[in-house]
Each structure stands twice: as structure tokens, then as C-alpha cells.
Amino acid sequence: MSGDTCLTTICRSSGAKPKTCSFREGSLGNKYVRLNVGGSLYYTTVQVLTRHDTMLKAMFSGRMEVLTDKEGWILIDRCGKHFGVILNYLRDDTIALPKNRQEIKELMAEAKYYLIQGLVDMCQAALQDKKDSYEPVCNIPIITSPKEEERLIESSMKPVVKLLYNRSNNKYSYTSNSDDNLLKNIELFDKLSLRFNGRVLFIKDVIGDEICCWSFYGQGRKLAEVCCTSIVYATEKKQTKVEFPEARIYEETLNVLLYETPRVPDNSLLEATSRSRSQASHSEDDEGFELRDRVRRIHVKRYSTYDDRQLGH
């Protein structure tokens, strides 16, 4: 038999009282001893238990008395969940720690009880590493090419909010408040991404032609754009001004939430916002036509400032 064997049940005679005994150092050598740790049964050798200067060495070298039951199982009044890991550390001087932070804490508590300082140090180092490492609350893609932007927007099942900021894309000097407003735009983007992370895809663009511009997409189409820069004329020179239209940005972000449903119009939502109760008697065909017309007019209105037709048409 090799390694430790853990049994799930205790086969102890009812009414049997535990008795005390002591081990003389070297009396058992490599012979197996039987341990009952909180109801979990283990087999190991005295040589393993006495390899390190721990409480287990004191127990099995004659310095401490140990309790045994009628069948000869040595009783240790501790939880046996992690005792197999402790035995492996005593054998090999190293172990693979649990991945779960709570289990590492439990193992460290047992190592402290048995005075196994090396294992305590391992657990403390692992807990510190897990404390330093963290899981991101949300992931923000950064655009590196127009094709990547197009792919992200078309493949997303969520509405998309994009912030383009590129401070170096400017041939004039900035006004006094421009830097502060640029930072405010970035901070607002971070706040919105944390608040609506599960419902909206937020992306950053640092290679575009604008200095600071918000774009809003729904169902793969551009719905609105908020440009935060303008050119102002000083006494002798032009300057670039960056603004922070916070209310408008909030409004457009809430608007794109209407597009987080599957790529079909939400008739119930559109009917609730566009029809009064007095029109409820219209036929279903008329209702369907009016709802489709409502969707069309929303999009026409949203795109009205982005008419790319040439003049004269």
C-alpha cells in the first residue's frame, strides 16, 4: 500500500472509550499507522509524520500522548478535509495548492494548527498573489483598424457606444479648459462602461480623425454622433475647443438601450410611446403600418444630420 488512504466511514465499536498511548522515537519506523482525523481515516508512516519539526512530530516521537480507539486508530480532533494535502507536503516538501481562495485559507488554518511553517508560508504567498491579481469588471476593446471596428459593430448583439479620442490629432493650440473636458469625457466613458457593461458594448478608438467624438450604434447601424470639438477664433489665432456635453451623452446612451433587443422592432414599446389609447380601435393592418412608419421616421430623424448626398440633388 502506498500513499495515504482516506475512508469515508468510521468502523468503531459503539461504546468504546478512547485510550492514551505514546510512541517512542523510532519504535515504528516505516510501519504504517492508522489516523482518524475528524472522521476521515488515513494510512501513513511514522517516518513521514516526523520528517519536519511540527506538532505531528511531537505526537509521534514520544513527546506527546495520543488518543487511540479500541481498534487502534489514532484520534486527531481536527477536520480531515485537507489532511491528505498536509501528508503530501510532509512527504515531498511541496504541493499543488487549491485554486479556490477559501480552500487555501482552510488549508493554512490546518497548517498553523500542526505548526507546519513551510506550508503556512506557501499559503500566505498564494493568497497574496491572488489578492494582487484581479478579474476585470469589464473588457473594453481598443480599435486598431477600421476593419476591426466594422467587424466588432456588425458582430455585436448589443448596442455599441464608441469613444474616439486622439489629443495629438490637432494642428492648433487648445483652449484652457480643453484638457480638463477631454479627461471628463474619458471618465464618463469609464463610468458608463461600468454601469451598462452587461447591456452595451463599449469600445475605444485612438486612431480616428477626430479629437473627441462619441458614436452610438444599434443593430449594426450608426444612430447618433456627438462631436465634442470645435474651432474657435482667438484674437490672433485659431484654437481647438473640447467640450463636455454630459447630458447629451447620457441621453444618447439611454437611447441605444432601445436596440438591445433582437434585431426586430419592439412593437409593444413603440406602440406605448407613439400611440394613445384612443387609437386602439384601429385595425391590425393599420397598426402595423403606423409602427413601421414610426421606426422609419426615428431613423430618418437620427440620420438627418448625416446626409452624404451631394449638393444639388
Image (cartoon, rainbow, N blue to C red):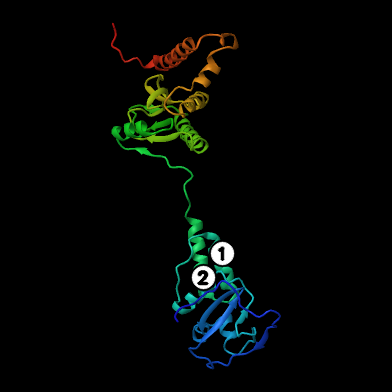
State the residue position of label 2.
Answer: 121
State which tag comes first along the sequence, 1 or 2: 1
Residue drawn at point x = 47 percent, y = 55 percent? 133
Whether label 1 touches label 2, CB < 8 Å: no
State the residue position of label 1.
Answer: 105
SS label for mark 1: helix
Identify the image quadrant of residue 310.
top left
Residue type for callout 1: Lys
Residue 180 marker: none
Label 1, label 2: how far apart the Cα atoms are: 12 Å
Badge 1 crowding class, 10 Å Cα cut-off, few under 14, some 14 to 19, many 20 or more, is some
- Relative vertical location of residue 201 with respect to residue 5 in this rendering, above or below: above
Badge 2 crowding class, 10 Å Cα cut-off, few under 14, some 14 to 19, many 20 or more, is some
Residue type for callout 2: Asp
- Relative vertical location of residue 298 with respect to residue 20 in this rendering, above or below: above
Q: Position of residue 194 (x, y in %)?
A: 50, 39
Given this view, does label 1 or label 2 mark the residue nearer the observer?
Answer: 1
- Relative vertical location of residue 249 with respect to residue 4 in this rendering, above or below: above
245 left or right of 77?
left
Q: In the image shown, does 69 or 116 lie closer to the viewer? A: 69
Locate the C terminus and report the quarter of the image it occupies. Answer: top left
- Residue at the top extreme of this rendering: 312
SS label for mark 2: helix
Locate the N terminus and report the quarter of the image it occupies. Answer: bottom left
Q: Position of residue 144 (x, y in %)?
A: 31, 37
